[in-house]
């Protein structure tokens, strides 16, 4: 990365425009979430049934979706899984309950079967009738109750809150409180940008989505700490230098490391997007957006906030 070895870009000069751009993206994302009535949640949180189906020959996903719609599973999510002829069909709690009730009404003899088994049987029968000359095999049936989904939602929320508190304590101990505030704002920025992306793209918030957000929180923090370390070193060596110049110099001195690290991770994520299959694609896509947001926040949000702090509280920052 010789191109960034002696970098001298004026990041501090455009910090407020960068912050304004981030604020617009986050505000638009929050507005989108409000308009949609919240994020789209997977069965991990809403409860429902997951059925893995194996066919002898692959058929287009839209054909499978049409069969599901005709069978009364209008809210089902269908993705290819593993081999081309394998499909994951996710049915949310409401659709699963309706399907189980209609199956019991049509065949009282099946009333002893669990709801998820009734759902999988109805799906299997619908696909067998809708796809000619193919054997339909049910490979796996899983269920998540609404109570479990609520507990997962609460655990995910607490995990984010605890991680932010841990960041506040760690950075305050290792650096100073103003560094901790800057790190918290940058971390919150990355999480909110990812939530905005989930809303814009219409992606489901699932356990893997929460995992992606927490992973990016850790990644962004590590990147920010590297920049903060250099700022602290330069504060000791260049006490009389203007704070804006010092921060800009520190960002440029760590830019090569930042670009190399982010680029390496991006190569891995691109491989997952291309070869990882449908099951992991949403996670890889969320991680890709998070890496971009995390790299951006380390350069344009976290470090420049220290300069804004100095401008707002010059005596306290100098001390």
Image (tube, rainbow, N blue to C red):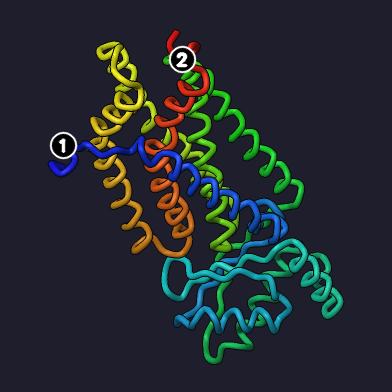
Relative to 9, say whether 245 is above or below: above
Q: Residue 228: x, y in percent?
A: 36, 24
Q: Residues within 10 Å of mark 2 (few under 14, many from 20)?
A: some
Q: Earlier in the sequence, mark 2 or mark 1?
A: 1
Is 195 displayed left or right of 9 in the figure?
A: right
Q: Residue at x 69, y 84 (%)?
A: 70
- Residue 225 spot, x, y in % from top left: 38, 26
Q: Which residue is mark 2?
A: 317
Q: Position of residue 16 (x, y in %)?
A: 45, 40
Q: Viewer-nearest of labels 2 and 1? A: 2
Residue on which the image places disc 1: 5
Of 250 and 212, nearer the camera is 250
Q: Which mark is residue 263?
A: none
Residue at 25% of width from left, 39% of height from top? 9
Where residue 176 appears, as percent x and y from the top left, is: 46, 15
- CA gap between label 2 and label 1 equals 30 Å
Say what secondary structure mark 2 lies in.
helix
Q: In this rendering, would 281 be left or right of 77?
A: left
Q: Is residue 212 left or right of residue 260?
A: right
Q: Quadrant of the N terminus?
A: top left
In screen coordinates, is 107 left or right of 27?
right
Q: Residue at x 49, y 82 (%)?
A: 60
From this view, report whether residue 129 is shown above or below residue 31.
below
Asked which secondary structure carries label 1, the reply is loop
Q: Is residue 98 above or below residue 9?
A: below
């Amino acid at each position: 990365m010789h191109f960034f070895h002696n970098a001298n870009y004026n990041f501090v000069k455009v910090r407020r425009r960068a912050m304004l751009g981030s604020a617009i993206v986050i505000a638009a994302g929050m507005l989108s979430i409000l308009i949609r009535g919240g994020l789209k949640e997977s069965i991990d949180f809403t409860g429902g049934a997951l059925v893995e189906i194996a066919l002898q020959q692959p058929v287009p996903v839209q054909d499978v979706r049409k069969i599901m719609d005709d069978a009364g599973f209008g809210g089902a999510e269908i993705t290819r899984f593993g081999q081309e002829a394998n499909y994951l069909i996710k049915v949310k709690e409401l659709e699963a309950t309706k399907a189980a009730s209609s199956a019991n009404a049509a065949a009282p003899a099946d009333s002893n079967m669990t709801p998820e088994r009734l759902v999988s049987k109805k799906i299997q029968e619908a696909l067998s009738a809708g796809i000619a000359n193919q054997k339909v095999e049910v490979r796996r049936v899983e269920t998540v109750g609404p109570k479990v989904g609520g507990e997962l939602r609460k655990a995910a929320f607490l995990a984010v809150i605890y991680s932010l508190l841990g960041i506040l304590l760690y950075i305050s101990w290792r650096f100073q409180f103003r560094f901790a505030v800057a790190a918290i704002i940058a971390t919150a920025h990355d999480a909110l940008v990812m939530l905005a992306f989930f809303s814009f793209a219409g992606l489901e918030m699932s356990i893997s989505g929460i995992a992606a957000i927490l992973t990016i929180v850790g990644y962004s923090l590590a990147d920010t700490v590297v920049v903060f370390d250099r700022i602290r070193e330069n504060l000791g060596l260049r006490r009389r230098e203007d704070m804006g110049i010092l921060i800009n110099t520190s960002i440029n001195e760590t830019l090569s490391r930042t670009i190399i690290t982010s680029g390496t991770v991006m190569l891995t994520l691109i491989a997952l997007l291309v070869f990882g299959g449908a099951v992991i694609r949403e996670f890889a896509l969320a991680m890709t957006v998070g890496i971009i947001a995390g790299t951006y926040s380390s350069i344009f949000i976290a470090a420049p906030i220290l300069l804004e702090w100095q401008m707002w509280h010059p005596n306290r920052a100098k001390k």
